[in-house]
């Protein structure tokens, strides 16, 4: 998931030199217990960002189910909005009594800096005990891994675990408008772009998009990259393996294509002055054929979901669709936790089948368990669950591009805005992203 740009400076406070911790030195030692019933009476302090709506409903149900199964363990939650959690997290983990479980965001903006600061626990012993690396799709497990020296992401030890809920960048479509222009759900990128042209010719806004807050452009950009680039190259770039530069990820072609869409009038008129939330509402109100956004993000009222569907942007080469996706939360354990066994047991539960079933019951996209089925009567949610099943079975996900450096998201948003305003070129966007990544990779070698 994306981290608000304003938070990256705060998270940078965990980098080496500002904390006494050393990357990789906090690891559970000796045998671990995986039977919560034998752990005695424990209270776990949990910090999460599930502060409202279906997020809170799901987390509340998971906590209730865990406490019912293990009445000797009490979960005490502190729920804050996402931005507030990211701002408070480093200081909370450095305090004398930090939360046992925290939702560190994946990537170098958050989890990577916490690993390098020695603030979160190396979970390898628990991963082995619970079989996480065998049961989690590799593409999802990699998102929680860092080398113990804190210099590589996507490999090495697990410093976090996913929950059984997905966060996916997908394409929403208006069923009635798709029928009106005489089109079906596109199976190729060429089909999708043909649908954009048909919509424009029919007087229908092809893509509902708002970018006044420099956030709405990222979803279509990443989706295009997933369609045009190699999934392996995207992952290697994000994980800073140093083997792949951004030119091989599909990013340059994605930038150029999005510029072409803008030039052809395929995006909401004057989208640079439209808020992303307003664009989503306009889409729900019937003012757009397609809308790129996160799973479960449409501002729908009861009964409206039947009007919409979702899919992952098709691959340009005709291969299986690939999505920028992750777990809806990355739970880590504080290196100072006195109840690591119990904390790891809760992480395992939150990634389990019952947690996925509770996600479906609350109407939010599950993850990790492809056998969990959507209830009848909600075609949009059925589409979402089918996407989640493919991610779990095929491992058809790539990490968020912005995880690759603490400041890449800001660089992309700023340069993309300038380019779309006619003040620069696609090559300038790519060059700025390339330089941002190269500068950060140098810091990892220190």
Image (cartoon, grey):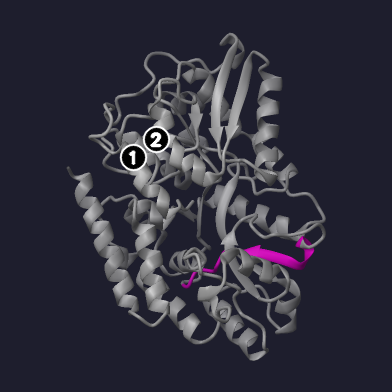
- Say whether disc 2 or disc 1 marks the residue closer to the N-terminus: 2
Q: Most extreme residue toward the bottom, as rendered?
A: 201
Look at the numbered discs 2 and 1 and tell me whether their residues touch, using CB distance below 8 Å: yes
Membership of 135 in magenta stretch: no
**Number of dots carrying numbers:** 2
- The answer to which of 424 and 61 lies nearer the viewer is 424
Whether residue 336 is situated above or below residue 387 in the rendered picture: above
At numbered mark 1, what does the secondary structure look like: helix, strand or loop?
Answer: helix
Residue 166 in percent (x, y) is at 58, 48
Residue 438 appears in which quarter of the rendering? Answer: bottom left
Is residue 287 something that shows in the picture? Answer: yes
Q: Is residue 307 left or right of residue 418?
A: right
Crowd rating for badge 1 (residues with CA inside 10 Å; few <14, some 14–19, many 20+)? many
Camera-near label (2 vs 1) is 2
Callout 2: few (<14), some (14-19), or many (20+) C-alpha neighbours within 10 Å? many
Q: Which residues are magenta?
A: 305-316
Q: Is residue 331 above or below residue 287?
A: above
Q: Is residue 312 magenta?
A: yes
Residue under the image location 62 percent in, 50 percent down: 389
Q: Which residue is mark 2?
A: 90
Q: Is residue 146 visible?
A: no
Look at 81% across and 57% down and name the residue there. 302
C-alpha span from label 2 to label 1: 9 Å
Residue located at (41% from left, 65% from top): 413
Query: Where does residue 416 sit, x and y in percent of width and height?
Result: 40, 71
**Residue 228 place in picture, x, y as percent:** 43, 70
Q: Is residue 192 above or below residue 312?
A: below
Indicate the position of residue 129 as horizontal and vertical percent values.
48, 23
Q: What residue do we see at 18% from left, 45% from top?
A: 445
The residue wearing badge 1 is 113
Q: Secondary structure at mark 2?
A: helix
């Amino acid at each position: 998931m994306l981290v608000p740009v304003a938070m990256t400076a705060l998270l940078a406070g965990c980098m080496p030199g500002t904390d006494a911790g050393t990357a990789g030195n906090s690891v559970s030692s000796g045998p671990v217990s995986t039977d919560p019933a034998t752990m005695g009476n424990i209270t776990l302090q949990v910090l999460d960002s599930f502060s409202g709506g279906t997020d809170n409903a799901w987390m509340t149900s998971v906590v209730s189910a865990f406490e019912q199964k293990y009445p000797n363990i009490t979960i005490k939650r502190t729920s804050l909005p996402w931005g507030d959690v990211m701002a408070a997290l480093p200081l909370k983990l450095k305090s004398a009594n930090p939360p046992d479980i925290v939702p560190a965001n994946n990537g170098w903006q958050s989890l990577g800096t916490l690993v390098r600061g020695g603030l979160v626990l190396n979970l390898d012993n628990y991963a082995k005990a619970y079989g996480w690396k065998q049961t989690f799709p590799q593409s999802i497990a990699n998102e929680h891994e860092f080398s113990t020296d804190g210099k590589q992401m996507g490999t090495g030890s697990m410093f976090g675990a996913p929950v059984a809920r997905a966060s996916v960048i997908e394409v929403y479509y208006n069923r009635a408008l798709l029928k009106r222009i005489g089109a079906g759900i596109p199976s190729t990128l060429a089909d999708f772009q043909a649908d954009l042209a048909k919509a424009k010719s029919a007087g229908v806004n092809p893509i509902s998009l708002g970018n006044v807050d420099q956030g709405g452009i990222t979803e279509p950009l990443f989706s295009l990259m997933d369609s045009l680039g190699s999934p392996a190259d995207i992952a290697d770039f994000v994980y800073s393996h140093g083997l792949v530069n951004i030119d091989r990820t599909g990013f340059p072609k994605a930038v150029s294509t999005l510029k072409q869409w803008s030039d052809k009038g395929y995006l909401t008129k004057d989208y640079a002055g439209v808020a992303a939330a307003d664009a989503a509402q306009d889409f729900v109100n019937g003012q757009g054929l397609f809308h790129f956004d996160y799973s479960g993000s449409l501002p729908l009222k009861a009964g409206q979901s039947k009007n919409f569907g979702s899919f992952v942007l098709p691959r340009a080469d005709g291969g299986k669709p690939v999505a920028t996706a992750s777990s809806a939360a990355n739970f880590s354990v504080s290196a100072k936790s006195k109840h690591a066994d119990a904390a790891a047991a809760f992480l395992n539960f939150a990634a389990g089948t019952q947690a996925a079933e509770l996600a479906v019951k609350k109407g939010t996209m599950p993850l990790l368990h492809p056998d969990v089925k959507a209830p009848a009567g909600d075609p949009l949610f059925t589409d979402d669950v089918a996407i989640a099943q493919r991610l779990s079975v095929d491992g058809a996900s790539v990490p968020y591009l912005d995880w690759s450096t603490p400041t890449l998201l800001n660089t992309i948003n700023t340069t993309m805005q300038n380019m779309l305003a006619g003040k620069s070129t696609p090559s300038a966007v790519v060059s700025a992203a390339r330089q941002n990544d190269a500068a950060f990779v140098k810091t990892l070698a220190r």
